[in-house]
Structure formats: C-alpha cells, structure tokens
Image: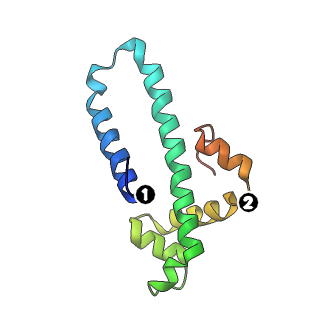
C-alpha cells in the first residue's frame, strides 16, 4: 500500500507503463475489452486530476508560490497549456458541487467534460 498520494500516483503510472508493454500480446478477442478498460482508466484519472486541482485551489497553492491566479500556476506546475489549465480549474471548482457527477466520474463512467 502506498504511503502517500504521490506514491500511489507513481505506482499507477508504473502499472500503466507495464500494461502498455503488454499491448503487443493483445489478441483480436481482447482488444475491445482493452479499449474499454483503458478509457475507464483515463476517465477515473481525469477525476483524480480534477480533485487534485480542487485541493490546490482550497490550499491556494498558487498564491503561496507567487502567482496571481491558479490557472497560471497550474500551467507552470504541470506543463499544461494555459487554456487547458483554465478549463481544468473551472471543472475542478464546478465538480465540487456535483456529487453525483463526481461519483460517476470516479466510477469511470463520465468522459472528459467540455
């Protein structure tokens, strides 16, 4: 079991890389299930990303690092484009007030928000 959130995410990243190496052995019969599982993992990780951004907004991490707004800090901290960081900040804020959508996203059933 991971000792911290960061360690848990690093473990997931390692597992994803190991899974990618198995793709050469995927059979035609497995490909549809593999695609569904990969999409579900992406959906869940997008919710984890939104929740992580929401936590940084609550802590005002961006302000403590000398930035005037969270979007610029997020873009700098993650190498996201500024427009994508802005969208992610808005999504993170909005999803805090949508518990049913949060649950659906964490279950892997909510695709990327517009």
Give the image's coloring scheme: rainbow
Q: Secondary structure at mark 2?
A: loop
At which x and y percent is residue 35?
46, 28
Tell me where residue 4 sits by quadrant: bottom left
Q: Nearer the viewer, residue 106 or 22?
A: 106
Q: Nearer the viewer, residue 55 or 81?
A: 55
Tell me where residue 17 sits by quadrant: top left
Q: Which residue is drawn at the image coordinates 59% and 62% (left, top)?
A: 87
Q: Which residue is drawn at the image coordinates 73% and 60% (left, top)?
A: 97
Q: Which residue is drawn at the image coordinates 49% and 76% (left, top)?
A: 72
Label number found at residue 106? none
Label number found at residue 97? 2
Relative height, residue 85 to residue 29 (above, below): below
Q: Which residue is drawn at the image coordinates 52% and 61% (left, top)?
A: 52
Residue of label 1: 5
At which x and y percent is residue 65?
44, 84
Of badges 1 and 2, the one in the foreground is 1
At which x and y percent is residue 111?
60, 42
Q: Nearer the viewer, residue 19 or 4?
A: 4
Q: Is residue 42 left or right of residue 87?
A: left
Relative height, residue 19 to residue 72 (above, below): above
Q: Residues within 10 Å of mark 2 (few under 14, many from 20)?
A: few
Disc 1 and disc 2: Cα gap in Å? 23 Å
Q: Secondary structure at mark 1?
A: helix
Q: Is residue 96 left or right of residue 55?
A: right
Labelled pair 1, 2 in contact (Cβ < 8 Å): no
Q: Residues within 10 Å of mark 1 (few under 14, many from 20)?
A: few
At which x and y percent is residue 46?
52, 50
């Amino acid at each position: 079991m991971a000792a911290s959130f960061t360690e848990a995410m690093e473990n997931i990243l390692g597992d994803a890389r190991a899974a990618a190496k198995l793709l050469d052995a995927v059979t035609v019969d497995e490909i549809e299930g593999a695609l569904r599982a990969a999409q579900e993992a992406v959906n869940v990780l997008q919710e984890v990303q939104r929740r992580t951004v929401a936590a940084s907004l609550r802590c005002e991490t961006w302000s403590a690092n000398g930035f005037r707004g969270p979007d610029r800090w997020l873009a700098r901290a993650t190498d996201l484009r500024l427009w994508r960081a802005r969208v992610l900040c808005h999504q993170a804020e909005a999803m805090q007030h949508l518990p049913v959508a949060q649950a659906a996203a964490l279950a892997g059933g909510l695709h990327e928000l517009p």
